[in-house]
Amino acid sequence: MEVVNQIASVRDRLKQNRHKKIGLVPTMGYLHEGHLSLIREAKANCEVVVLSVFVNPLQFGPGEDLSRYPRDLQRDIQVAKEAGADLLFAPSVEEMYPHPPLTQVQVKGLTEPLCGSSRPGHFDGVTTVVAKLLHIVEPDHIYFGQKDAQQAAVIQRMVEDLHFPVHMVTCPTVREEDGLAMSSRNVYLTPEERSQATILYRSLSEGEKLWRQGHWLNSKDIVSFIEDQIQTQPLAKIDYVQVLHFPDLEPVHELTGSTLIVAVAVYFGKTRLIDNMIWN
């Protein structure tokens, strides 16, 4: 695996591989098993796998954890190599944004509920950096995880609206043995917060079980049940619990005959965790 830091170097290395199928896995680094599952999926379907490691300042708002976001590039290089990546692109902020960007990519509508309501501007930063990566790498496939389901829906719409010649692949959420969704931010949790955070998966799972048994009459009942479950943990502070249609993220009126996303964002101490399940 080769490690490069310049955009020109990425394009130069890939120029000779344009006849091969190229897969891109965009990350902010501090890789965990969720990221590695994306690399392995890309490796199974593509001949060249590019992994980007870039903590994108555009998607962090004032007071968020940009400065303390976990970073360990040397470890990332080792585990990415073991997982099968062929090229690791780790640019500096100056390389990706040589000037303060006057151009941003914005997807309306889909970015307004869920994380968009509590992190204004976040998805503008996400779509802008992913658009740049798509132009730099020009992959055939791009890979995201289901844990960031709203992000996946937003990127899919951007790809469709702007006719990017890329196929987007969304892979299942990877979880710890106790159900907690893997996240680079899990490292922030104290042991007690880590223990209580498992309520996210348990409440979503129990909610789905009851939904399949026909217990719910409307989405408000689902939200109330999951909120009650989460609030049994004293360290949990709910940001949101929402039920929406997926992938258009429209409000739900009927619980039958559609695909739903049940999504949560909860603080444990200063750490904000998200999780979701897709109910068909």
Image (cartoon, rainbow, N blue to C red):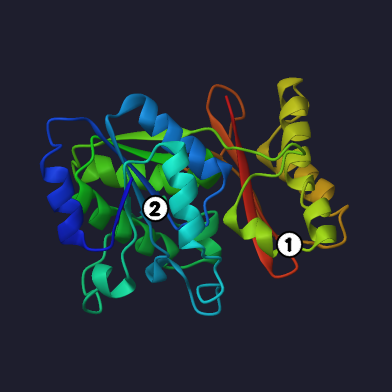
Image quadrant for the N terminus? top left
Coordinates of residue 117 in the picture (x, y in percent): 52, 62
Residue at the location (41% across, 59% down)?
123
Q: Nearer the viewer, mark 1 or mark 2?
A: 1
- Front in this rendered view, residue 245 or 24: 24
Coordinates of residue 109 in the picture (x, y in percent): 39, 52
Residue at the location (18% across, 57% down)?
9
Query: Image check: 192 left or right of 143?
Result: right
Residue at the location (18% across, 41% down)?
163
Return the mark for residue 51. none
**SS for dot 2:** loop
**What amino acid type should be assigned to the residue bearing mark 2?**
Gly
Question: Which residue was labeled with disc 2?
Answer: 109
Asked whether residue 148 is in view, the answer is: yes
Question: Can you tell which quarter of the image residue 15 is in?
Answer: top left
- Front in this rendered view, residue 106 or 1: 1
**What amino acid type should be assigned to the residue bearing mark 1?**
Leu
Coordinates of residue 157 in the picture (x, y in percent): 32, 43
Return the mark for residue 189. 1
80 over 116 or under it: above or below: above
- Front in this rendered view, residue 235 or 188: 188
**SS for dot 1:** loop
3D distance between C-alphas at marks 1 and 2: 32 Å
Tag 2 or tag 1, which sits nearer the N-term?
2
